[in-house]
Image (tube, helix red, strand yellow):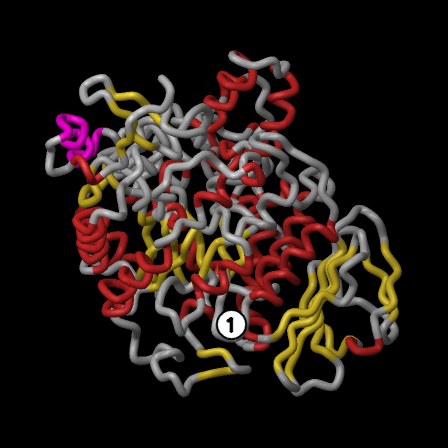
Amino acid sequence: MAEDATDPGDSARASYHGHRRRWWKEAVVYHIWPRSFMDADGDGIGDLRGIIQRLDHVAALGVDALWISPHYDSPNVDNGYDVRDYRAVMAEFGTMADFGELVAAAKARGLRLLVDLVANHSSDEHAWFVESRRSKDSPYRDYYIWQPGRDGGPPNDWRSFFGGSAWSWDDATAEYYLHLFAPKQPDLNWENPAVRREIYEIMRFWLDKGVDGFRMDVIPFISKDPSFADYPPERRAQPHYHHAAGPRLHTFLQEMHREVLGPYGAVSIGEALGVTPEQAALLVDERRGELDMLIHFDALLVDRGEGWRWRPWTLPDLKAVFTRLEAALDHHCWRTVCLSNHDMPRLVSHFGDDAPAWRVRSAQVLATMLLTVKGTPLVYQGDEIGMTNYPFGDIAEFEDVEALGAWRVSVEEGDVPPEEFLAHMRRTSRDNARTPVQWDDGPNGGFTTAPPWFVVNPNAAEVNARTDRAAPASVFRHYAAVIALRKQALALIYGDFTDLDPAHPRLFVYSRRAGDDGYLIVLNLSRDEVDYELPETARPGAFVIGNLAPPADDGGRLTLAPWEARIYRLAGVAG
C-alpha cells in the first residue's frame, strides 16, 4: 500500500527543520500483544476480535498506528515468535476473515496497521525445517544453518539467548543446526537467495491485505559470521553485539528495501538489540534505503546486568542514552522512543514508582518523557492506564521460555539460590508485560470470562481502564493530552533535543528547539520536592501542560513537586 496523497512526506519538498516529513515520524504507535489484550470468544486467550472490540479505547488516546505482535500460526514455544505458517492466522487468535475485519476497523478509525515480521528464524514445525532436517540432500537443507560438530561438541561457543548452546544436534542427519533462541526456533539461512525470496513474498502477502508496514524481530541478526568462529573475548558477556554485526546485513536490508519496502511505501521498524547508536546511523539513513527506524535497547537495558540480573541505575545513565542518540543520528536518520514492550518490565515499575501513592503521577511523568523526547513514540498496551509488574513468588507462575530456560541453567543446573533468581526476575522478566490487560474491576480484570491463559495482576480491582479513564487526573487522560499537543507541535517532533542538566540526579530538563520554535520540558523523577534554577539559555515562556495544577513559579526559579511533569514554550519563541 503506497503512502497517502495527503502524507506530508509524499514530496521530498515537504520538510521541517531539515527533516523530510513522513507520517511515521509524526505518528504515535500503540503496541498490542494479542494474547493478553482482550479475549472476545471466551477461551481465556486474547484474539483478533478482542482487539477490534477495544479499538475505540486505543483510538481515544489519539494514536496513529497499531503494531500487533505475531498473529501467525505457531506452536507458541515463544508466544508466536516461532512461526509455523507465515500465511495463516493462529487458530487461537481467529481467522483470516477476522484479520481482514481488523484491518478495516483500524482504517475506519484512522489507524494504520503494522505487523511483526519474524524473519531471523522460524518454528522447527515449519514445512521448510521439516524438509530441511529430513536429508542432507533436501532442496530445503540450505534454508537453515547446519554445521558439523567440533571436538565432539557444538561447532562453536555461541549461546542461545534463552540459555545453553545455540546449537542442537540432529540425529537423523548427524549435524548441528543453529538457533540463537529456543531449539524449536531454528535460524534461517539468509545467504540462500531462495530464503530471501520466500521472505519477500510473505511480506507482499500481508501488504496486499492492507497492512502498512512491519516491526522486524531481531532483524540485525539475519547475517551470520561465515567463519562460525568462537566469540571474540570482548563479546562473550554481550553476544548480541556480535550477532548484530554480520558482514552482509546492509546488503540484505538494501535488497529487501528495493524488492518490497520501497515499491509498497511500507514503513519498517527494526528491533535493534546489539546495535549501537553509531551503527544505527547506517541502518536508518534514508539515503541508503534500508530501514526507517529502530527500536533501541540502550534505555531499556540501563538497569540490566548480565543475562537476567538487575543492576542499580541512575537518572543520568538514562538521560545519557538520549543524548548519545541525538549525537549519532543526523537529519537523515530517525529513531523510535521505546521505554517498554512485550519483552520488558512494565514502564511504571521499571522507571517510575509503582507504590500506590506515586503510581499515577510517575506514570504521567514517564508518559511526558516518552512523548516529548525525539523519535516516534511506541506506547505499550496497559501503560496508558499505569499497569504494574506482577508480584511473582514462584517459578511455577512464569510462562516465558526465557525465564524458564534461565531457571534451568542458573538454579537447577547452577548454584544460584532460588530466591536470588526470583528477586531479579521480578524486576526483569518479560512476563511482567504479558499479564492480561486490566479493563475493569470485575473477574479477571475484564479480560476474559474464562480462566485466563496467564495470571492477572492482583491489583486489577484498583488499576484498570474503566477506573483510570473515569478519574479526573488519570494516566489515560494525560497520555491523550500530550499526544494531542504533539500532533500540533512540530518542534516536539523534529526539533533538536538538548539535555540541559545531564548530571542532575532527580530532574530531567530538556529542550526541543527548531529555529525560533521550541519547548522546555521539566520532569521530576523522584519522591522529593526539588527547587531548581533553569539556565539563562532556556527560560520558560507560557506554561502548556503538566500533570499538576499550573505552577506559579517566578521566572526561571522552579519548585517541582514529587513526580511532577511540566511542558512550557521556550521564552522568546514564536507562538
Classify residue 284 as left or right of residue 49.
right
Taking depth in this image into account, of 366 and 148 the one nearest to the observer is 148
- The image shows residue 337, relative to residue 434, as above or below, that is below
As helix, strand or loop, the secondary structure at mark 1 comes to: helix
The x, y position of residue 91, in whole percent, is: 22, 34
* Res. 100 visible in picture: no
Q: Identify the residue at horizontal 66%, vertical 62% (top origin).
A: 323
- The part of the chain drawn in magenta is 125-136
Taking depth in this image into account, of 73 and 282 the one nearest to the observer is 282
Q: Residues within 10 Å of mark 1 (few under 14, many from 20)?
A: some
The x, y position of residue 24, in whole percent, is: 42, 67
Q: Identify the residue at horizontal 36%, vertical 24% (top origin).
A: 150
Q: Identify the residue at horizontal 70%, vertical 38% (top origin).
A: 356
Q: Considering the image in quadrants, where does the C terminus appear?
A: bottom right
Residue 130 among magenta residues: yes
Classify residue 83 as left or right of residue 445.
left
- The image shows residue 500, relative to residue 384, as above or below, that is below
Classify residue 122 as left or right of residue 513.
left
Q: Identify the residue at horizontal 27%, vertical 47% (top origin).
A: 190
The x, y position of residue 561, in whole percent, is: 81, 55
The x, y position of residue 3, in whole percent, is: 30, 73
* Res. 540 visible in picture: yes
Q: How many marks?
A: 1
Q: Considering the image in quadrants, where does the N terminus appear?
A: bottom left
Residue position marked by numbered label 1 in the rendering: 487
Classify residue 81 as left or right of residue 544.
left
Residue 135 among magenta residues: yes
